[in-house]
Every structure is written in C-alpha cells, then in structure tokens.
Image (cartoon, helix red, strand yellow):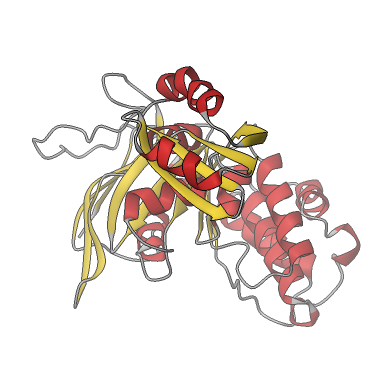
Amino acid sequence: MAQQTSSASNDRVPRPDRGAAETPEHAGETIRPAVSTRALTRDYGGGTGVFGIDLVVPRGSVYGLVGPNGAGKTTLLSIVGGTRRADSGEVTFGVDRHRVAVSTDVPEFEPWLTASEVVELAGNLVDPRLPREKVKVALHRTGLSGYGDRKAGSLSRGMTLRLGFAAALVADPQLLILDEPTSALDPRGRSDVLDLVASLRDLTTVVFSSHILADVQRVCDHVGVVRAGRLLYQGPTAQLVDTHMRPSWLVRVRGGGTDLLRAFAAETWVARVSSLRPGLFRVEARSLEAGERHIAEVLSRSSARVVSVAPEESDLEAAFLSITGGPR
C-alpha cells in the first residue's frame, strides 16, 4: 500500500534509499512540491496500471498530466487524491493534506439537494464553521450565482461539472486535482472550464489531467507525459516543446521546387526536409543556430522564386508525439 505523508504536518515516513528522479527542470535544484510520489505502483495485470511513478508537482503550478485514454492518469490521480490504494510506493504532501480537493470528470450528487446545499455540505466536511458567504463566493467563481436554489439533479452536465468545482473550491484548497475536466464538453463549455482553471493559478496548486493536448498547452505551466502507466517526462510545458522539437521553417516558393528540395536534403545541418504540397516545404534543422545561419544561403543559391520563409511554431502535440513515438 502506498504511504501518504505530509511535510506540512511533519508526518513523514522514511523514504526508500534511492535518488530523486531528475527532470529537465528539477535536476540539480531543490523545489517545493505541493505533492510528490516515489515509485508509485498499482498493477491491475495485463500491463495496465501505473508503474514506478515519481511525480513532482511544484507549489503554485498548474500541472497538466497528459496521455492517451488508458495511460494511467485517473489511477495516478485517484491514488494521490486518496480514493484508491497503491500496491507500493509513497505519496508526500507539501501542503496540508486535509486541504486537498478532488473534482472528477463526472461528479455525482444527491439529486434532491440544491446547488448551495451541495457546496455547503462539501465545505462543512473541511470546516464545520464555514461561513455561508464562502458558499456564495464558490458559486459565483464557478459561474453558478443564479443556480444556488436549483436541484443538483436538474443541472446539465456542464453545470454539474461547475458544481463539482464549486464544491472543491469552497474550503480554499491548497491542492486541487481535476480529472479530465473538459471531457465530453462542447467547445464553449471547454473554454469556460479552461478559463476557470487559469483563474486559479494564483490561488492554489492545480493538477489537471487530459488527453486534449491543446487544453493542457493553453492553461498548464508544467506538464507530465504518461503512456502505458509510466511517466516519460515532466517539467515546464515550454521546456518540453523546446527540448523535444527540432527547429523548423516553412518555405513557400514558385517554380524550382524539386531542385530546392534536393538542395536542402544534401545539407548536413538539415535533419529532414519534406514537401507538404506543391510549393510548400518544411525544413527541420539539427539546431536553431545552424538553421538560422544556413537557410538563407541555400535559398540564395536556388533558382526557385521564394515567396516566404517563416519559423514554424512548435506545439505540445508535436512534442508529445516525439516523446511517445506515436499518436495520442
């Protein structure tokens, strides 16, 4: 069973004698995690579960846990949130473990309770003397100000999700765990949820799982990549993109495209050149410096008429595919 410890209360259990996992951000430096895990394992058999996870969530971050469906994200967050047991490993909290809140992708409430009653009950579990004003604040923050008297059973899926957020936020958690909060929502609902997550950045630490990479890139400053139950990468979102993406340029030309393609392919600084469609090429360099230095030289020697040359913006999806070697 996983041990759960809290550095905030000095309730610690000795850790196994093994070095902390290094990530691009954390190597050689000390960080203050809101929560971390050591060698966390839950094996369901048949290759499913999570295996040896060393998670580090910095305090004050919005940490995105990304991976395909079935990668182990929900299992990992359920163990951290205390709703599921691990076979082995350790969970260590750097915040008050009683101020950790969890909101699932499909929260369930007693249908006869009003939205206000749901939030009030959730708050009273943490603080029996919780001021009622906090219930109003939580409903307002999640866009439910006009729904306090509505029965939970009458709310749409999107509104039920918001109610789950309100119940999680009412007692001012120091760590908020959101499991697939944008799944099955329409574009407007997804955008509203992402705006809400972004607004929490200065208020608490958020761990946010998703298989929708664009959502994670939009709101998360840190990211962990999970595949087949293993954590393949964790660190700043921008650093993931920079580390695992080659610098590339989009080149548009008129005429002479075949010769230009061959010219780029012959250059040692070019990692790959590909034709996206007639007159449009992607040139990937082995380094940013080499590309910036030599791409103009190749174009100047070409008979092709250059229409435009522009650096291609890297994104999280491309970096994810680079790490995992396959689609989401």
Residue 201 sits in which quadrant?
top right
Tell which of 269 and 262 is nearer to you: 262
Task: Please say whether residue 127 is visible from this viewpoint.
Answer: yes
Residue at figure coordinates x 60%, y 47% from the top left: 280
Q: Position of residue 233 (x, y in %)?
A: 33, 43
- Is residue 194 shown above or below 60? below
Using the rendered image of the protein, determine whether residue 130 is visible from the camera's viewpoint. Answer: no
Rendering quarter of residue 37: top left
Nearest the viewer among 149 and 49 is 49
Residue at the right extreme? 146
Whole-percent x, y for residue 138 in the image: 75, 51
Compare residues 299 and 4 and report the one nearer the observer.
299
81 on left or right of 305: left
> In the displayed structure, would residue 151 be above or below residue 43?
below
Q: Position of residue 223 (x, y in %)?
A: 45, 43
- Quarter of the rendering occupied by the C terminus: bottom left
Would you place residue 7 above or below residue 154 in this image?
A: above
| Farthest left residue in view | 17
Residue 134 at x, y percent in the picture: 76, 47
* Residue located 22% across and 36% down the image: 21
Judge from the rendering whether residue 121 lies leftward or rightward of residue 188; answer left or right. Answer: left
